Image: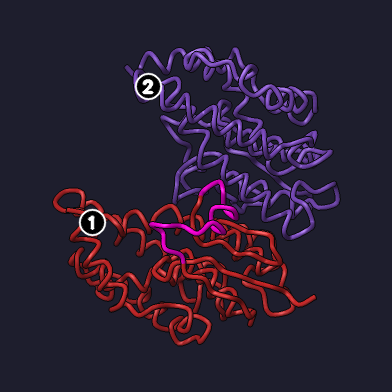
Chain colours: A purple, B red
């Protein structure tokens, strides 16, 4: 039986983008279904009854929820192509640690850059730079977090780059100035086809954030 | 070379307890080092410079931080004994999903049961019961979340049972009444030696919470 793979997603979601990149990395054909998050489909509610969130990967009728779980699942099921996670248990634990760090830090801090003002925004600005300096340190001299090829941490992190125009514009930050190696890494990732074809343009994301921002005041 | 395993921990931490259970399940000898969280050891700061939190597993000089990462690491390195995570990728994704659910829900909601009053406490009470009803549903007719033996979700979840006297006393809840199958599961887990010998007594935890609570008003 041919694999039937469906992705319930929303185009601007960095979490959904992770799953799109992982599927593209493995060369898996799938049906992309855009969700209207203000009017979620019965399929989304059925497939992710606990969190009711995108992305949901549906593989032959079974759902895998939470983006990092879905990326690990894809890596484990379609394991003929090169792995996103390293084979060494220690290296694997470190990849999981940093992907978890990305999950704990970037989305919320990033949101405070464009949705808040004053002190809260200033605190977010400071933390945003600190977080990226730490990530830059972890990257070190490697081309990617995964070494000489795209890995789990790269897949977890690069989607946020599509939000950078908004982060930088509203947060009044130049990350290129603060963390040049981080930006060089991001640009290198964007040259990989599985990444570039899975991610929306920064301008398109920014246009949406501009509108969202109007509603949040 | 014999493995040198050290655990930096604090006795009342449900996160630390997970690592203790996993080590006990695998029969690994290790050195337990109790941390004073108000005066963290140089080793803790060196081994977990990012989060500066316990538990930290140190294996032959290398640190693995974040409890679920440490449990997965233990399961992958000492893989001769039966696995905590299932071998099937889909089942594995579900185990990770539920362990993550435990991480996202229980600690904070539980804290609001004993540290808050009024509306916040009432909301926590409602959510605490909802969360455990969902977990009970996921358990279904299985003996453990891992099936007929202790698994990853069991290891992630059972430590919170040591806080139940406090949750139930201050939250004025009887989970045995609300979720009898959940409590039956917890009692069955407590009969397993790797669990019982790794966890402190509910009364001892409660005595500490009573003191902490005095400070939080």
Q: Is residue B147 visible?
A: yes
Task: Give the label on residue B115, or none.
Answer: 1
Given residues A205 and B72, the one toward you in this image is B72
A81 relative to B181 in the view: left or right: right
Residue A110: x and y in percent read: 49, 27
Image mark 2: chain = A
Given residues B92 and A42, the one toward you in this image is B92
Q: Does residue A156 lie above or below B217 as drawn?
A: above
Q: Does residue B85 lie above or below B46 as drawn?
A: below
Residue B172: x and y in percent read: 17, 66
Given residues B39 and B208, the one toward you in this image is B39
Residue for badge 2: A116
Residue B103: x and y in percent read: 46, 56
B65 relative to B164 in the view: left or right: right
The verdict on a common chain for dots 1 and 2 is no
Residue under the image location 73 percent in, 54 percent down: A91
The magenta-colored residue range is B35-51
Quarter that holds the C terminus of chain A? top left
Q: Quadrant of residue B170?
A: bottom left
Q: Quadrant of residue B12?
A: bottom left
Quarter that holds the N terminus of chain A? bottom right
Q: Quadrant of residue A123?
A: top left
Given residues B188 and B180, the one toward you in this image is B188
Q: Does residue B59 lie above or below A147 as drawn?
A: below
Q: Residues within 10 Å of mark 1 (few under 14, many from 20)?
A: many
């Amino acid at each position: 039986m041919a694999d039937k793979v469906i992705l319930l997603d929303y185009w601007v979601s960095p979490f959904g983008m992770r799953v799109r990149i992982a599927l593209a990395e493995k060369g898996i054909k799938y049906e992309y279904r855009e969700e209207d998050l203000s009017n979620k489909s019965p399929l989304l509610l059925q497939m992710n009854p606990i969190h009711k969130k995108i992305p949901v990967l549906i593989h032959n009728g079974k759902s895998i929820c939470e983006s990092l779980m879905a990326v690990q699942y894809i890596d484990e099921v379609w394991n003929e192509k090169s792995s996103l996670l390293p084979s060494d248990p220690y290296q694997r634990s470190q990849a999981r640690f940093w992907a978890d760090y990305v999950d704990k830090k970037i989305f919320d801090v990033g949101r405070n850059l464009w949705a808040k003002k004053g002190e809260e925004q200033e605190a977010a600005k400071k933390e945003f730079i600190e977080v990226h300096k730490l990530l830059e340190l972890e990257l070190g001299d490697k081309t990617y977090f995964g070494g000489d090829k795209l890995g789990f941490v790269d897949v977890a992190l690069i989607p946020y780059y599509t939000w950078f125009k908004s982060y930088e514009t509203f947060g009044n930050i130049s990350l290129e100035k603060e963390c040049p190696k981080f930006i060089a890494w991001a640009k290198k990732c964007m040259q990989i086809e599985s990444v570039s074809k899975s991610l929306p343009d920064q301008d398109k994301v920014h246009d949406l954030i501009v509108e969202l921002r109007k509603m949040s005041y």
